[in-house]
Image: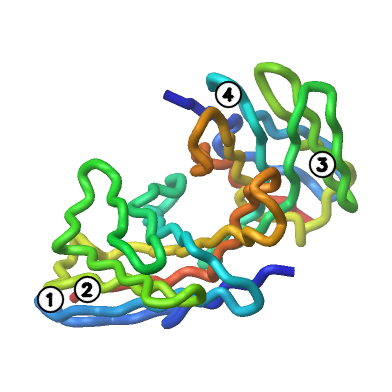
């Protein structure tokens, strides 16, 4: 089945530094990937849609200069949290849709998530 | 705007005690309803997709059903390893981005 690999699984950084999170589709190509943020006991909040070869589409209220998304290939999307602050601490999860399964399925496969802690 | 409401927020069961989780939704033109399982500190894992009212799907101790207004995830004789958060999501209209509910946190005690 479709597998999405996300790295790192956890990261601790100092306030003001930038952190990059990678999301790879291992056995399928994904022209579109999605980045979510999840707070404790809350649902998944869609941050942005990553589009291969073009600019990401950000959800309302998400700062595009704070959360830089790059989707340089059909199997890799990256999220960079720039000048991180403690309030950026959260669980970030990426997902992708295996388009070979057909648009009728629309099943998202999720990565294992990345726990970011900003000191 | 699509809305998904899951209840209860949390559920504690004894091993073997069957129960159901509810997912109520309001959408314009349902194209699919998804159930995912999420373990602590992990990403969601796909369980089922239901496409139309009356449809049912089963996987081990889990059975998902769908009506025009809600979906149920029935758990029969649960085991401690079924403990997780169960998320419901709906896909509708012209967008392929599903809307997620807040989830039900299930704890099964041995």
Callouts 1 and 2 close, C-beta under 8 Å: yes
Dot 1 falls on a residue whose secondary structure is loop
Q: Chain of mark 4?
A: B
Inter-mark Cα distance, 1 to 3 = 44 Å
Discs 3 and 4 carry the same chain letter: yes
Quarter the C terminus of chain B occupies:
bottom right
Inter-mark Cα distance, 3 to 4 = 20 Å
| Residue corresponding to mark 1 | A15
Q: Chain of mark 3?
A: B
Inter-mark Cα distance, 1 to 4 = 40 Å
| Residue corresponding to mark 3 | B75
State left or right for residue B69 relative to residue A79: right
| Residue corresponding to mark 4 | B25
Inter-mark Cα distance, 3 to 2 = 39 Å
Discs 1 and 2 carry the same chain letter: yes
**Disc count in the image?**
4
State the image coordinates of residue B88 (x, y, percent, origin top left).
Answer: 61, 39
């Amino acid at each position: 089945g479709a597998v999405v690999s996300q790295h790192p699984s956890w990261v601790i950084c100092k306030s003001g530094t930038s952190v990059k999170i990678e999301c790879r589709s291992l056995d399928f190509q994904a022209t579109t990937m999605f980045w979510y943020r999840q707070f404790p006991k809350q649902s998944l909040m869609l941050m942005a849609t990553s589009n291969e070869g073009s600019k990401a589409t950000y959800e309302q209220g998400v700062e595009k200069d704070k959360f830089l998304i790059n989707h340089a290939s059909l199997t890799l999307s990256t999220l960079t949290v720039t000048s991180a602050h403690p309030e950026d601490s959260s669980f970030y999860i990426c997902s992708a849709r295996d388009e070979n399964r057909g648009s009728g399925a629309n099943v998202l496969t999720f990565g294992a998530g990345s726990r970011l802690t900003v000191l | 705007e699509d809305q998904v409401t899951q209840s209860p927020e949390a559920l504690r069961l004894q091993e073997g005690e069957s129960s159901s989780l509810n997912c109520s939704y309001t959408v314009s033109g349902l194209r699919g309803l998804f159930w995912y399982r999420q373990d602590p500190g992990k990403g969601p894992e796909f369980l089922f997709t239901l496409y139309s009212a009356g449809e049912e799907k089963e996987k081990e101790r889990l059975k998902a059903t769908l009506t025009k207004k809600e979906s149920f995830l029935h758990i029969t004789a649960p085991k401690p390893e079924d403990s997780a958060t169960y998320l419901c999501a709906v896909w509708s209209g012209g967008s392929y981005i599903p809307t997620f509910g807040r989830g039900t946190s299930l704890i099964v005690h041995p």
